[in-house]
Amino acid sequence: MKQHTTEPDGRLGVLLPGLGAVATTMIAGVEAIKKGLSQPVGSLTQMGTIRLGSKADNNRPRIKDFVPLADLNDLVFGGWDVYSDNVYQAAVNAKVLEPGLLNAVRAELEAIVPMKAAFDRNYVKNLDGTHIKEATTRYEMAQALIDDIEQFKTNNDCSRLVMIWCGSTEIYMEESAVHSSLASFEEGLRNNDPAIAPSMLYAYAALKSGVPFANGAPNLTVDIPALIELSYLTNTPICGKDFKTGQTLMKTILAPGLQARALGVTGWFSTNILGNRDGLVLDDPDNFKTKEVSKLSVLDEIFQPEQNPELYKELYHKVRINYYPPHGDNKESWDNIDIFGWLGYQMQIKINFLCRDSILAAPLVLDLALFMDLAKRADMSGIQEWLSFYFKSPQTAPELAPEHDIFRQLFKLENTLRYLMGEDLIAHLDLEDYQDLASTV
């Protein structure tokens, strides 16, 4: 496959629908890193290593030195938002990063002004956008987004683009007839079908333009046959959904360990408080349901109670999110886990994670931008399951169950990179090392 992966020549435009806390934290961070003011902690592409060959070879290069990824200095940022604030103003309002760091990259951030957003308050009732496009139909709105994409590419002299959804969680939606095929979807655009959400307009515009699209929210968006079909027609990668950051990150680390040790779980109660724009949006029950469905799916897929009824058939999983403005972007989560071990004896685990939601999400956005660009240059179209590592509710082929175990997700991601570069895949058996040792005895 290596010969089919083209080099990342030229500038890479990173388009972000939703220039709120997550997006501005990522952009400011990249600009600070480029100036040598900070380190890209949490970014697998920048700080992660990958083993090549036998363990005895001790060959573990940085991923960015092994795979032909775009250089941070070649990234150009843009996006859309329902508010007209430039990225510096938006970052100040988000109150995630310290003023000193923001001021050090102020000029770069002020130069990024959002395009008017495709917005419909019916899908995000607790936001009242003022910087929005006007259009008669969804088809006209999608065409306006396509024009934005082309104009951004031209104005910024980009050779390639990617799009990462960093916007709000939309109301809960299920797949319907208008989503069943590209033909029905495009007819729905012209008929202004309300089952086509704003996030789908961005995804459609990206895919029509051949721009890879990653969905960072739990919205339905590209999890529909119509847009999957379009992704293959235009040879464009897609992936999602819902960035795996705080509480769910902890679940996908801890639950595989409990399952690996064959320890039983009877209950897992999770609650969160946060006060950023995400918390405000999720304060509406219809939007919360979208997030709840995403978060609830994790444990069932890891524990598989139908295969392990003695350990997990009684599992009761409850998730709560509460809007609490004083915390701002500093999300706090509590988990109470009731487990049992040898002879059925009961035990408990308590987790209190005081995390910073956008600090955890920002490196995911960067990694997805770089990996999705790589996938496009490697001629990989459609669903990119190998990027499940980054999502709460990974997108897979319809007949396949998602993998939620973060360690298995990382294993698949690394083997995909080895495959792309023509390296041997690693199964972690390491039998050859011990056979060599035996031959010397």
Image (spheres, rainbow, N blue to C red):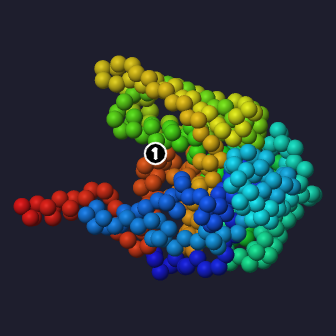
The quarter of the picture where residue 259 lies is: top left
Q: Residues within 10 Å of mark 1 (few under 14, many from 20)?
A: many
Residue 230 vs residue 270: left or right? Answer: right
Q: Is residue 25 above or below residue 156?
A: above
Is the residue 33 above or below the residue 3 in the image?
above
Residue 132, picture quadrant: bottom right
Q: Secondary structure at mark 1?
A: loop
367 or 404, which lies in front? 367
Quick check: 380 above or below 407? below
Q: Position of residue 399 (x, y in %)?
A: 52, 51
Instruction: For the C terminus, give its image quadrant.
Output: bottom left
Q: Is 383 positioned to the left or the right of 283 in the image?
A: left
Q: Which residue is rendered at x = 50% and y = 68% of the image? A: 64
List x then y, in percent, for residue 42. 54, 53
What residue is rendered at 76% in x and 54% in y?
Answer: 19
Q: For residue 368, say whether it is visible.
A: no
Q: Please give the name of the residue rendered at 63% of the width and 53% of the height, measured from the top-left corner.
A: 362
Q: Is residue 430 visible?
A: yes
Residue lying at 67% horizontally and 31% vertically, measured from the top left: 273
When the figure is inspected, residue 378 is found, relative to residue 285, above or below; the finding is below
Q: Residue furthest front?
A: 100
Q: Residue furthest left?
A: 441
Q: Which residue is mark 1?
A: 405
Report the number of discs: 1
Q: Nearer the viewer, residue 163 or 87?
A: 87
Query: Which quarter of the image is occupied by the N terminus?
Result: bottom left
Q: Position of residue 343 (x, y in %)?
A: 30, 20
Q: Amino acid at mark 1?
A: Asp
Residue 106, how many percent across, how many down? 76, 60
